[in-house]
């Protein structure tokens, strides 16, 4: 499946919090989704802690047939994002305190 979607920063409170809203649809018109994401950055025991919440609502054929597959893919994307962010923050070294 290929999606056409748009996400917009709806709230920013640098350097600790941001919110994103987005929506999109499958190019083949198999479904539509709406998402809201909240990211919170903090420090815990000398390490950067990132927490997030993502709410996604899916309608159409995607919701009926692709829910399980999409959840598995979302989990994989979450793991890739977490790993990439951790590598990036470790590469910043001393700059992490400036987040």
Image: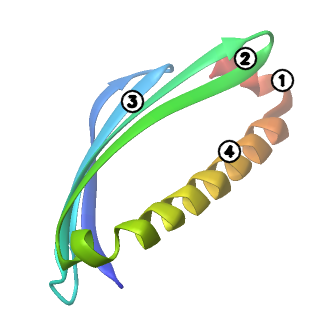
User: Which residue is label 4 attached to?
Assistant: 85
Residue in the picture at 42% in, 67% down? 68
Disc 3 is placed on an element classified as strand
- In the rendered image, the quadrant that contains the C terminus is top right
Between marks 1 and 3 in the image, the one whose residue lies nearer the viewer: 3
Disc 1 is placed on an element classified as helix
> At which x and y percent is residue 25?
20, 73
Between marks 2 and 3 in the image, the one whose residue lies nearer the viewer: 3
Q: Quadrant of residue 38?
A: top left
| Cα–Cα gap, marks 2 and 4 | 15 Å
Is tag 2's residue or tag 3's residue first in the polypeptide sequence? Answer: 3
Residue in the picture at 60% in, 16% down? 42
Answer left or right for 97 relative to 63.
right
- In the rendered image, the quadrant that contains the N terminus is bottom left
User: Which residue is label 2 attached to?
Assistant: 97
Is tag 3's residue or tag 4's residue first in the polypeptide sequence? Answer: 3
User: Which residue is label 3 attached to?
Assistant: 18
> At which x and y percent is residue 5?
26, 67
| Cα–Cα gap, marks 4 and 1 | 16 Å
User: Which residue is label 1 attached to?
Assistant: 94
């Amino acid at each position: 499946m290929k999606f056409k979607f748009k996400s917009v920063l709806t709230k920013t409170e640098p350097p600790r919090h941001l919110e994103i809203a987005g929506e999109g649809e499958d190019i083949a018109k198999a479904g539509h989704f709406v998402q809201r994401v909240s990211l919170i950055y903090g420090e815990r025991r000398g390490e950067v802690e990132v927490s997030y919440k993502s709410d996604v609502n899916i309608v159409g054929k995607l919701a009926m047939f692709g829910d399980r597959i999409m959840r598995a893919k979302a989990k994989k994307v979450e793991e890739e994002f977490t790993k990439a962010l951790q590598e990036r923050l470790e590469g910043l070294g001393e700059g992490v305190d400036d987040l």
